[in-house]
Image (cartoon, rainbow, N blue to C red):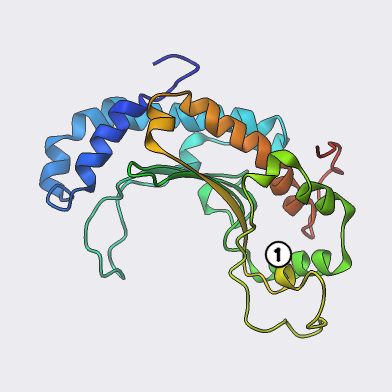
Amino acid sequence: MTASQPLDIGAAFRFLRALKLNKNNDRAWFEAHREPYDTVLRPGFEDFVAGLLIAAAKFDAGFAHVEPRRCIFRIYRDIRFSNDKTPYKPRLSAFLSPRGWRGSTPGFYIALEPGGESMLAAGIHVPEKPVLTDLRRRFAAGDAAFDRLMRSKRFAAYLPIATDPLVRMPLGYDRDHPRGEFIRARRYMVSRAFADPELSRGDAFGLFRTAIRDTAPFVRWLDLSLAQRREPLAEEFE
């Protein structure tokens, strides 16, 4: 593959479409077809993630030295507590953050999955309680940078913000607060889905890189809103 297209999307989708069939999603089929996964898909996806980390580092230096393998989810499913006992995920996926996929910090989730299931999501999915408390306080207080972000033309394509809100307002907040949706939130994620032809016939890496550029101000705002803040946000939102 080339530097501009580190992963062969066509080959990846062919493998994943076959794996997605229930009759193929077993260890015997996977072992018989392991070569393309080991020689093309896995290293190609690692390069794909490495390139996106470089793109993310332009907006947050914390991404600059992250090992790509720390961000990539295994293709093997944890079936211990699931009714679905198929052993493999029919996708290539990763969560890009300064702490890798294990971090409950803001970042970017990417998934390559045929059937229109490919996507980029950005934000914080499972914030720890102190983090959630800090974010709720920031939303309650109001913030001009967040208001500008919500008016950004680039950002509009990824809205609305998925919040999985509580039914009731947390204690200590006015139930009629104008930012109640965000104060009641249990997560803060935006996303965009990609159709199969859009990726297999176009610039797949470029599409994800652009999505990171568009959503990076949101990830950065979340990060700077937490208790352990880093340097002030310098960029302006369009």
Q: Is residue 108 left or right of residue 141?
A: left
- 130 sits left or right of 207 in the view: right
Badge 1 marks a residue whose secondary structure is: helix
Q: Residues within 10 Å of mark 1 (few under 14, many from 20)?
A: some
Q: Residue at x 40, y 47 (%)?
A: 117
Q: Is residue 140 left or right of residue 114?
A: right
Q: Nearer the viewer, residue 74 or 167?
A: 167
Residue found 58% across the figure and 30% down from its top: 209
Residue 5 drawn at (x, y percent): 45, 20
Q: Residue 59, located in which quarter of the rendered image?
A: top right
> Residue at the location (69% across, 74% down)?
184
Q: Count the marks.
A: 1
Q: Is residue 78 above or below residue 91?
A: below
- In the figure, residue 217 lies in which quadrant? top right
Q: Is residue 162 above or below residue 2?
A: below
Please identify the quadrant where the C terminus is shown.
top right
Q: Quadrant of the N terminus?
A: top left
Q: Position of residue 201 (x, y in %)?
A: 39, 24
Q: Nearer the viewer, residue 134 or 179?
A: 179
Q: Nearer the viewer, residue 238 or 106?
A: 238
Q: Position of residue 148 (x, y in %)?
A: 83, 48
Type of amino acid at the residue the image marks with label 1 = Val
Q: Residue furthest top?
A: 2
Say which of 234 and 129 sits in front.
234
Residue at 30% across, 47% down: 90
**Looking at the image, can residue 65 be seen?**
no
Q: Position of residue 175 (x, y in %)?
A: 78, 83
Query: From where the camera sits, is residue 141 visible?
Result: yes
Say which residue label 1 marks: 131
